[in-house]
Amino acid sequence: MMFRGFHQILTSYSSSSLFRLSSCGKFFSSSVVARDGEAAVDLMGIASQVVIAKNPEEKLSLLLKGHQICESCSPSSLAILTPSNNSGVEYDAPGRPDKPELVHPTKMLTHKKLKVPLQIYLLHSLAHIELNAIDIASDMVARFAPGMPLGFACDWFEVAYEEGVHFQLLCERLKQLNYSYGDLPGHDGLWRAADSTKEDLVGRLVAIPLVQEARALDSKERLNKKMVSCADAVSAKLVEKICDEEIKHVKYGVKWLNYIAEQRNTSAKLLYQEGVLKYTGKVVGPFNVESRTEAGMPTDWYQQTVTKN
């Protein structure tokens, strides 16, 4: 499967000539607040379109369009976004291609039962996770940006854009190994987790970036060892790169949970732990403490809700 819309992005990704992203959003140019507000409304509309789109290529094309709008905005603006006739969500679930076949998470077969190499199974699973991550980050913008500062929309569209790059890289690696995204089944467990928090921004921040994406940091060493055991150094390096880049996504979760805690005059730690208990029930160790700390996530946030494997 070839996604033409992101070809230029991937070509320049390694040199960072186009993909000039930073945790503070410094790749954006300055702009007047009025124009920022108009761009943000456009961004929320595009984010909705990303979620609705069935074709992954269309999702990627829309992400590029939104990225170009982001470049004209000033994410440091403190302007609060307000709903308009062009904002809001009109979907219950994301658009999906005809393949892969979606099954319940408990019905997923192992790579041995599917009769495919382990690295193919892992790469396909990661690609499916990234496609879901595109939709979830886009939904964060479409659903929760109204009432939040402009920087919130910019940050989470940036996350969606990066997930798109990850998805493309994984699809290209599958292609190099004579497979395609859609060849194996997938599940909608990640979207289910997001959907359970559709009316609760704090819950979404906790359940997705601070639990699900934080787990991606924890899985880095385990995934790397599995790829190396398959004698696939190229895939191992790719997975390591993706895991490292998830640090920023967790960092944004911490950033905006801290923002909400300050607005509510409460503790971000308390919001996190209440969200875990309500939506996930626990966080599972062992943890990549180094990466979590780099993302700004204090250990005392999660050590009291931990369950070890």
Image: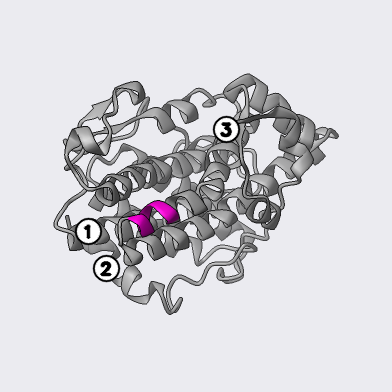
The residue tagged 1 is: 3
- Measure how far apart labels 1 and 2 are at the Cα level: 7 Å
> What amino acid does circle 1 point to?
Phe
The residue tagged 2 is: 7
Say if residue 190 shows up in the picture: yes
- Measure how far apart labels 3 and 2 are at the Cα level: 32 Å
Question: Front-most of 12 and 156?
Answer: 12
Say if residue 39 shows up in the picture: no
Residue at (53% x, 67% y) in the render: 21
Residue at (75% x, 43% y) in the render: 299
Q: Are marks 3 and 1 in contact (CB under 8 Å)?
A: no
Mark in the foreground, 3 or 2: 3
Residue 206: image quadrant is: top right
Inspect the magenta stretch and tell me whether residue 228 lies in it: yes
Q: How is the image coloured?
A: one colour
Question: Front-most of 12 and 242?
Answer: 242
Position of residue 177 measured from the top left corner of the image (x, y, whole percent): 18, 59
Using a 10 Å C-alpha cutoff, classify the residue at mark 3 as few (fewer than 14 neighbours), some (14 to 19) or many (20 or more). many
Residue at (51% x, 59% y) in the render: 245
Element type where label 3 sits in the image = helix
> With respect to residue 298, does 228 lie above or below?
below
Which numbered tag is attached to residue 207? 3
Position of residue 125 measured from the top left corner of the image (x, y, whole percent): 32, 43
Element type where label 2 sits in the image = helix
The magenta-colored residue range is 225-229
Specify which label sits upstream in the sequence, 3 or 2.
2
> With respect to residue 87, does 104 lie above or below?
above
Q: Are marks 1 and 2 in contact (CB under 8 Å)?
A: yes
* Residue farthest toward the right in the current orientation of the protein: 265
Residue at (40% x, 46% y) in the render: 134
